[in-house]
Image: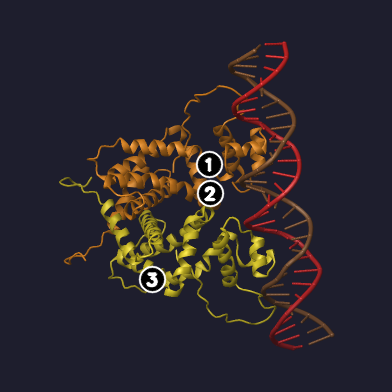
Chain colours: A yellow, B orange, C red, D brown
Amino acid sequence: MSSSGSESAAVRPRSGRQPSTSQAEISHVALTLFIERGFESVTVDDIAAAAGIGRRTFFRYFVSKNDVPWGDFESQLEQMRSYLDRIPNDVALIDALRMAVIHFNHLPSDEVAYHRRRMTLLLTVPTLVAHAALRYAAWRQVIAEYVAARMGLPPDDLTPQAIGWALLGASLAAYETWLRDEESQLDELLERSYEAIAVAFVSKRVASFDE
Amino acid sequence: MSSSGSESAAVRPRSGRQPSTSQAEISHVALTLFIERGFESVTVDDIAAAAGIGRRTFFRYFVSKNDVPWGDFESQLEQMRSYLDRIPNDVALIDALRMAVIHFNHLPSDEVAYHRRRMTLLLTVPTLVAHAALRYAAWRQVIAEYVAARMGLPPDDLTPQAIGWALLGASLAAYETWLRDEESQLDELLERSYEAIAVAFVSKRVASFDE
DNA sequence: CTTCCATTCGGCACTCGGTGCCAGTACAGT
DNA sequence: ACTGTACTGGCACCGAGTGCCGAATGGAAG
């Protein structure tokens, strides 16, 4: 979901030629073009030209055009991992997960508008929706590993995987609703989303034994 | 998830040139190649050649190479829609959904082996994993519409969307586990998957009021 | 049988994303 | 100046996907 860069200071200006640009810079230029003219009708050549770099260089900063709106997602995941690890174990699992999702998606209010447009692209443009599945897989894996650790199960066990999926889905549903309504509060939508799933998935086998 | 063809009889052999092949035939030829040599290293030209048609013709039967393993998914969805509509309303929602998923994924035992290989492709090859997101969106929409109808909500409301997502995720988690274990029973895994989510998502606010 | 219409076929040329290769360019330390 | 290192970007190439259009096929009307 969220994925803005984290700008950790480059610790090694050691030797060799200096980078002529940065991921963030290209991303910003490209996003502007996407919003103006639509994702599909902006070619990689257009982006490279607008950023003042060669087409070949573009592909050194981004593996694919689809990655542009994501920024440095991997470091976001790393952050989420360490955030989760710092949550005390007496916090209920679902609450720990909710806290992580909320924290992960919290950003400075002056970036919210930009973030909304970025997310709208990601959840609207078919190519990006498809590509996002690969990012989501990594996200789910982080969740699954945490859940697995807490429950003493292997990370690829059905239960942590299912919970990872459900949490992702619930969060995305909340996200989509949030994007449609300027007034809405993401935290609250997440809560409602999780609750809706809880209610729906509990079978009310009233007055009958467990099978 | 499942998606084998449904072979509804062509009702109009009326006029014009006869099709020289069929979606199912191309799909079968292609799947064989995919399994032999891997999805990525089979080009559309290869498929066309193996199927004895022109490359241009291939793209009349399939919008993209990624669609090949899916067969006629849209008609599968249609089937699921009508199946859901036939479920009496006194069946608990979660049970109705489970029944639909199970029914949707049930197939003749002589096709299971083939189906497994097809699904393994879909859940393994990155391009296909990504592309699948678009199919899943349609699948979720069917679920969301059903849930919305039963709850008297608009289909794009948070609750039905969240449930659609969670059901999809739970089912896919079950599917992945099923694919890894030849002995496992899909029905049972689905049940366990849904149950895991129910347990995880209920916050145990013991002795505290609802906020 | 011929003509006409509908439909499918498939070659050709083109766009665009993505990659391998490699020579060029900037910068650091010796 | 010399050398090693890292970023640059042009070029050629591949594969997916599309628009165009003439050719092939078959049914129905004359």
Closest to the observer: A200 or B189? Answer: A200
- Residue C3 vertical position relative to residue A87 in the rendered view, above or below: above
Labels in figure, total:
3
Classify 10 Å Cα crowding around label 3: few (below 14), some (14-19), many (20 and above). some
Where residue B119 sits in the image (x, y, percent)?
48, 44
Side (left or right) of B66 relative to B191: right
Q: Relative to B76, is B124 on the left or the right?
A: right
Quarter of the image that includes the C terminus of chain A? top left
Residue A20 seen in the current view: yes
Earlier in the chain: of badge 1 and badge 2, it is 1
Q: Are marks 1 and 3 in contact (CB under 8 Å)?
A: no
The amino acid sitting under disc 3 is His
Residue B189 seen in the figure: no
Identify the chain of the residue marked 1, using the numbered disc in the image: B
State the mark number for residue B69.
Answer: 1
Q: Chain of mark 3?
A: A
